[in-house]
Image (cartoon, grey):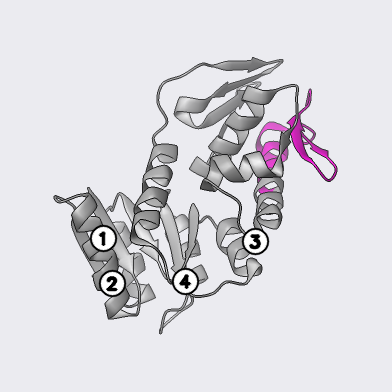
Amino acid sequence: MKTLIIEDDLSIIDLVALTFSVAWPDIQIVRTQLGKEGIELAETEAPDFIILDLGLPDMSGVEVLQEIRSFSKVPIIVLTVKKDEMDVVVALSKGADEFISKPFRQMELISRVKNVLRRSHPSEGEVYAMGNLTYYPALNKIESNGRELKLSPTENIIFLHLANQRPNYVTYRSLASVIWGDEYPGCHKAIRVLVNQLREKLALVLSQPDLIVTKYGLGYYLGNG
């Protein structure tokens, strides 16, 4: 197991490193205080997951996130003092898998990281057939009419939850629970961003623009496409 910590505060780096070394004694920890170097390390070190601060001295954490996502699907957990809900929305919309505010509880950090890693490596499971669409949760992909759409870990967990509840709708609260383990201020807005991104990919890659239907004020359900 290897993690990359991109954080400008050395005391936070030390705390995160200590937390992980207790939970995973054999973990290899790579660290940097700079975003540019973090991008390079993400490519050369091939970490199993990344802890990323949004407030870096040389470039914004969101820019780092975007750069890493251009070449890697590695799980990224954003760790920041910023608490505005728009920070959560932007980070998630750019590809973050999790969001934790400082100050954080050490066991909460471990729990969130384990959840992200589980989502990134789903176990073998059922294949879902929905008309001309086939969904493979264990492979993070959907196929339709010979075309294939790869899902991010978070998109996969959203679609799997919708598929398991079909034809019933899923609430914002239940989606927050399966994605992050609980609700937090602004999570409904973050969910709307994630679902809209997934809709855009379904429309662009698979020509399935109406597959995810909004039940206004309540949540979403899978339609007939």
Q: Residue at x 20, y 55 (%)?
A: 22
Q: Which residue is mark 2?
A: 13
Query: Is 222 colored magenta in this rendering?
Result: yes
214 versus 103 height, above or below: above
23 versus 124 height, above or below: below
* SS of the residue under disc 1: helix
Q: Position of residue 1 (x, y in %)?
A: 22, 47
Q: Residue at x 45, y 79 (%)?
A: 59
From the viewer's side, name the closer residue of 130 and 17: 17
**Amino acid residing under circle 4:** Thr
Disc on the earlier residue, 3 or 1: 1
Q: Which residue is mark 4?
A: 80
Q: Quadrant of residue 32?
A: bottom left
Query: Is 27 colored magenta in this rendering?
Result: no
**Amino acid residing under circle 2:** Ile
Asked if residue 74 shows in the view, the reply is no
Residue span colored magenta: 197-225
Q: Could you tell me how far apart the alpha carbons at marks 1 and 2 are, in whole angstroms? A: 10 Å
Q: Which residue is mark 1?
A: 19
Disc on the earlier residue, 2 or 4: 2
Q: Which residue is mark 3?
A: 185
